[in-house]
Amino acid sequence: MTTERLDMLRALAARRTDEVVITTMTATLQWPLVSSHPLDFDFLAFGMGHASDFGLGLALARPERKVIVLKGDGGLLMSLGSLVTMGQYAPSNLLVLLLENRSYEMTGGQPLAPKADFVALALGAGLEKVERIDDLARFEAELPRLLTEPGPHFVVVPVTNSEPLPPVAHTDHSERVTNLRAALGVTPPEGGSNTGGGEGGF
Amino acid sequence: MNGASAARTVAVIEDLGFTDVVSIPDGESRHLHRALIDTPEIEVYSPTREGEGIALAAGLWVGGRKPLVILQNTGLMEAGDALRGCGIGPSIPLLLLVGWRGYPGAMAGALPVDSAYPYTEPLIRAWELPHRRLMSDEDLGVIGEMAAVAEGTSKPAVVVYGYGFTP
């Protein structure tokens, strides 16, 4: 079974309160359709495959705050070793939702390794709270636990998408960082200008 | 010109207020890595690859910590996209301590020259990152200098060390 991705995102947005939500690739395009929150962070074009590495660092820095990472299976394959690092440092406030669609959807839907078992990979990497949630009803039922129970959690959610994807929004990267640090109450470094620009075409 | 002392380097890192070190150990940094692990005031994280480490450090910084990244020049070559995306592009002032594999052999005239040696400084210049060399204890001030440059410009800056750290 699979879940329509936008429905799954809508369910998460309805339950989410003060957690940081990091999105990348196609989740970045659809998350703004269901959420507009100061703690939303668009990781698109910050580094291929590294959304959960960034989320791990943020979770370690802010143990009092839940950090949710929405990333795809193609992205995970680009930094597969990060599972081992997550398993080693294991911050209890990290929730990774792996949107499994077996393709590089952002670049045209090219297929990826059909036999890779992401639950087995995560368990083998040392993560303990690993599960697969196959349908929307169960995802909605499990969300309250996933948002409150100490983790880290690694959850594989098989998804499909039948909705048209919004275009990529190339907002300024340094502005995204500045906004998130402000939302987290982090004092900007003295003298830092954070005036870097955004990126070009995707 | 025989490498900086790990103990003195850790003291500098502490004095500068670094809270975390993200480090993938290599031969040249092994004594420094050991000394950092033995320093309870500093958290040390060892990811599996350097690009992963730079993204992890960026997350730490966004969350309010002050991380230092230690990696070999070969790792810097691997980590290019992460450095672009999690450092230069979003204006995150990471300080990178980069081991210059191949430098001692090249200075000694050893053949063959390690292919990691000749590309190190040209690569850093190509990224338009300011950098200084650390070759001995006399150069330890460059760490603070480059940390200030990183914070002042909101961009990554680099210290390249040419010799392995001594205990």
Image (cartoon, rainbow, N blue to C red):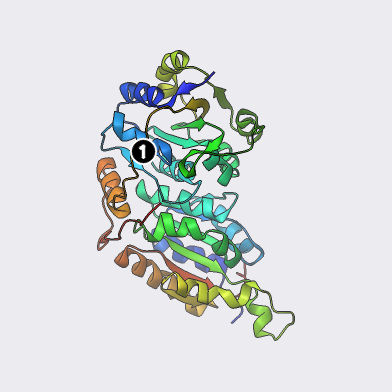
Give the crowd class for mark 1: few <14, some 14-19, many >=20 residues within 10 Å: some
Q: Position of residue A82 (x, y in %)?
A: 56, 43
Q: Is residue A49 visible?
A: yes
Residue A184 shown left or right of residue B71 in the figure: left
Q: Position of residue A64 (x, y in %)?
A: 37, 34
Q: Could you say which is closer to the camera, residue A156 or residue A163? A: A163
Q: Quadrant of the N terminus of chain A?
A: top right
Query: Dot 1 lies on which element?
Result: helix
How many numbered marks, from 0 up?
1
Residue A107 shown left or right of residue B2 in the figure: left
Splitting the image into 4 quarters, where does residue B149 fall?
bottom left
User: Amino acid under label 1?
Assistant: Leu
Asked if A127 appears above or below B37 in the picture, the reply is above
Residue at 42% x, 38% y: name it.
A26
Residue at 66% x, 74% y: name it.
B115
Splitting the image into 4 quarters, where does residue A114 fall?
top right
Asked if B122 appears above or below A109 in the picture, the reply is below
Which residue reaches farthest right?
B111
Residue at 54% x, 37% y: name it.
A103
Residue A189 shown left or right of residue B25 in the figure: left
Q: Position of residue A96 (x, y in %)?
A: 48, 33
The residue pinned by badge 1 equals A29
Q: Position of residue B111 (x, y in %)?
A: 74, 82
Which chain does the residue under circle 1 lie in? A
Q: Is residue B41 visible?
A: no
Residue A69 shown left or right of residue A17 in the figure: right
Which residue reaches farthest bottom?
B109
Asked if B119 appears above or below B53 in the picture, the reply is below
